[in-house]
Image: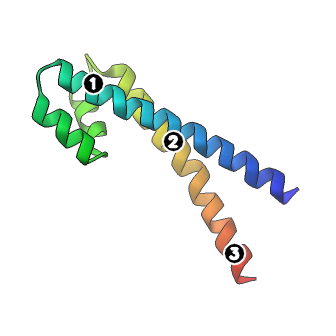
């Protein structure tokens, strides 16, 4: 039963990671499409900057912002409990 729960959490975390990655790539393309090459390069190098950029340009980047925020939420909601479970399993 524990293995099933761990696999389920890993699959959900992978969905969150994929959603965040797609939002990040879309934000880079949007910044480059608006002729903001420096911002596109900074978003590529500093990944969390994509959240700031897409929230700042909410009217044009509403979809990207939702992808980034929902993906980040799903990642945190699954990876943090999995880490706590893993560390408690290792210690005992």
Point 19% across, 18% down: residue: 33
Q: Which mark is residue 52?
A: none
Q: Is residue 50 above or below residue 48?
A: above
Circle nearer the N terminus (3, 2): 2
Helix, strand or loop for disc 2: helix
Q: Whole-percent x and y of residue 53?
A: 23, 34
Real-space CA distance between mark 1 and mark 2, rounded to the nearest whole angstrom: 18 Å
Q: Residue at label 1?
A: 29
Q: Whole-percent x and y of residue 2?
A: 83, 59
Circle nearer the N terminus (1, 3): 1
Q: Check if mark 3's residue and mark 2's residue have beta carbons within 8 Å.
A: no
Circle nearer the N terminus (1, 2): 2
Helix, strand or loop for disc 1: helix
Q: Residue at label 3?
A: 88
Q: Which mark is residue 17?
A: 2
The tally of labels here is: 3
From the viewer's perspective, is the residue at label 1 or at label 3 nearer?
1
Point 46% across, 43% down: residue: 72
Q: Residues within 10 Å of mark 2 (few under 14, many from 20)?
A: many
Point 54% across, 39% down: residue: 16
Point 70% across, 78% down: residue: 90
Real-space CA distance between mark 3 and mark 2, rounded to the nearest whole angstrom: 24 Å
Res. 24 image quadrant: top left
Q: Residues within 10 Å of mark 1 (few under 14, many from 20)?
A: some
Q: Is residue 82 above or below residue 17?
A: below
The N terminus sits in image quarter: bottom right
């Amino acid at each position: 039963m524990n293995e099933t729960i761990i696999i389920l959490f890993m699959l959900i975390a992978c969905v969150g990671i994929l959603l965040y990655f797609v939002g990040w790539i879309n934000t880079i393309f949007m910044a480059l499409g608006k002729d903001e090459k420096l911002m596109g390069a900074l978003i590529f190098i500093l990944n969390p900057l994509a959240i700031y950029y897409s929230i700042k340009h909410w009217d044009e980047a509403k979809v990207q912002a939702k992808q980034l925020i929902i993906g980040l939420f799903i990642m945190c909601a699954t990876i943090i409990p999995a880490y706590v479970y893993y560390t408690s399993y290792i210690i005992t």
